[in-house]
Amino acid sequence: MAAAKTRASSFSRHLSTAAPSLGPGLKCGPNGTVLLSSGIPDLDKILGGGFPLGSLVMVMEDAEAPHHMLLLRNFMAQGLVHSQPLLYASPARDPRGFLGTLPSPAASKDDKSRGPEPDQEKGLRIAWQYKKYFGENQLNFDGQRDGKHEYSNEFNLRNPLERHFINGQRVDCVSIQDSPDLSILQDRCTTFLSQLPRNDGSISCAGRIAIQSFCSPQCVYSNMEWEMLSFIRSLKNMVRSSNSVAIITFPPSLLSPSFCKRWQHMADTLLSVKAIQDDDKELAQLLTGYQDMIGFLNVHKVARINTQVPLILEATTFSIKLQKRRYLVLECLNQAPVDGSSGNSDGTSGSCSSSSKTGNLDF
């Protein structure tokens, strides 16, 4: 009897066993993507690790408070710490002066003062014991603490970034205040992205593009809605074929409703920030830790590259807090006890209604 022949399908999936060689500030993500940190560790966890390379991030500003600047500063500072090329466009007359307001990474003594958690130390001991069973890429997935820089740093908003991170770097600043059209910004973006071609095998460096208040009234082209939409579409196509991430902040109140929807549709990752009033007594009764909040962050869309499976988040609205008035922290909203009595911050209670009478629960 002849031996049975094994049938080999021509539609077999090509999987590379070796992990790609990545530069500083990059790590492997799901479905063959490479992630880049947003500069906020909590935001990286919410988004599944960070911003995928080749994605366009858009942030809707709040007209009452510049909370979007917190996200922009950490995003730019994280790139400079990792020696990544940066292109910054601003409606200010001197955009390079904004680099002096970037925060500095948290010092090691601040990290030691917080003290490691016992569970974390136990996890590190287990990882060391089973190190021979895992690859180095899996052990250092969340960040290389033994390396020169971590994947995602905590930044001290009170300390400015040291000058040596800014000087000598490939930093390009563009003022879009007096530009009659978007041709100058288009050319600068094209030149910048041409230096970062897509190479999935080995990625030694990744770039960052930060455009602040794109449709600001200070810009001459602020009324050219179709031209701005065409620029965003062109930028998205160029970023998709390069090793970079672009982030654009814009005030949605200055756009018509139809164009605002178009802009949101162009984004791979869509975020929005909202300020809260200090004397909002009704909101203070509903949320715990209201006195420490400075605003809210809403996640409207998360980038999904190389997959069609949507990402379902546990929460889409997070509170923006300044821990010790130095570190930017994002937390899930916790509802305060309904009766105003003392309770835990998780909002858990013994009953599902405000009434203290026992009886059937009415859902």
Image (cartoon, helix red, strand yellow):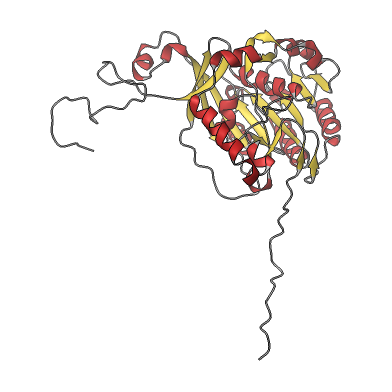
Image quarter in which the C terminus is found = top left
Residue displayed at 67% across by 14% down:
103
- Quick check: 215 above or below 49? above
Picture coordinates of residue 222, whole percent (x, y): 70, 22
Q: In this rendering, would 310 be left or right of 181?
A: left
- Farthest residue toward the bottom? 1
Residue displayed at 24% across by 31% down:
352
Q: In this rendering, would 221 be left or right of 330?
A: right
**Front residue (pair 354, 212):** 354
Residue displayed at 73% across by 16% down:
91
Image quarter in which the N terminus is found = bottom right
**Image quadrant in which you'd find residue 255:** top right
Picture coordinates of residue 276, whole percent (x, y): 47, 15
Picture coordinates of residue 108, whole percent (x, y): 65, 15
The answer to whether residue 48 is seen in the rendering is no
**Image quadrant in which you'd find residue 215:** top right
- Farthest residue toward the front? 129
**Image quadrant in which you'd find residue 71:** top right
Count the labels in the image. 0
**Front residue (pair 154, 43):** 154
- Quick check: 3 above or below 292? below
Q: In this rendering, would 91 be left or right of 167?
A: left
**Front residue (pair 303, 115):** 115
The answer to whether residue 11 is seen in the rendering is yes
Q: In this rendering, would 345 be left or right of 165?
A: left
Picture coordinates of residue 201, whole percent (x, y): 79, 46
